[in-house]
Image: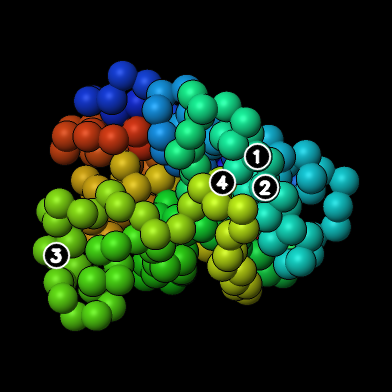
Amino acid sequence: MIYESRTHQGCVRTSNQDTLLVYPERDLFGVADGMGGHKAGDMASSMAVEIVTRSLKDANPSRDLFRLAVEFANKEIYHKQQNDTNLSGMGTTFTALWKNGDSFLIAHVGDSRAYLLRDGELRQITSDHSLVAEMIHNGTITKEEARTNPYRNIITRAVGTDFSVAVDMLEMDIQKGDKWLVCSDGLNEHVDDEQIRRILNENTLKDAADLLLSTTLENGGSDNVSIVLAEVDA
């Protein structure tokens, strides 16, 4: 695997509440996008990444272990905010890949995304846990309308906001040449899927990471943005 990662506070926010999960020794890659006050959002995302990484560092890849690690992070974050009123309401998205032989396990909560570029075609693998995603599913709004909908940043599921959390667990086969993108919503807020597809197709992984970030910032950078790219090179 080869990989690149970028994170930036954006052009509007005064802090970065995203945390990257980049653990190449375990083929573990992801993003957590914290929410809550400045301190709370930072803490929630960093706790999620630290707890999941620590839980899996000596483990063989397993769907059940991956899910349990995220559930354990959820309980720890929830208990932390219950015991400190300054952290009330904190939570985080969590989307990550873990290589399991000839497949990737994917654990997903919230509206950060995992995309797969294969044979030149881009697919969003995860489904957003958000209000606008539900509205699209119900036919209330279109995907195009969702990009400017005032409720687009409201998520319906997060790590740490409740005592328990439902973790979407997915598994995808691996092919040589696949490019995976895990990102916080700060990217897809400003860069649409066709732009992402073109950038990934036409550039090396390093240049693609730089271009995705610079395009986001040039288009407004209204939120923190985090990008993790991983390419199957063998």
Q: What residue sits 79% from the left and 45% below the top?
A: 55
For the C terminus, the quadrant is: bottom right
Q: Determine which of the numbered discs, if any, sits on residue 144 in the image.
A: 3
> What distance separates the C-alpha of mark 4 from that of mark 2?
6 Å
Where is residue 10 shown, x and y percent of the image? 29, 28
Label ID, residue 75: 2
Dot 2: element: helix
Name the residue: 14% across, 65% down: 144
Mark 1 to mark 3: distance in Å?
38 Å
Q: Which numbered disc flags the more N-terminal residue, 1 or 3?
A: 1
The residue lying toward the viewer, choosing from 60 and 17, is: 17
Using the rendered image of the protein, determine whether residue 167 is visible from the camera's viewpoint.
yes
Q: Is residue 220 left or right of residue 181?
A: left
Q: Mark 4: which amino acid?
A: Gly
The quadrant in which residue 127 appears is: bottom left
User: On the image, numbered disc 1 is attached to which residue?
Assistant: 79
Q: Quadrant of residue 44?
A: top right
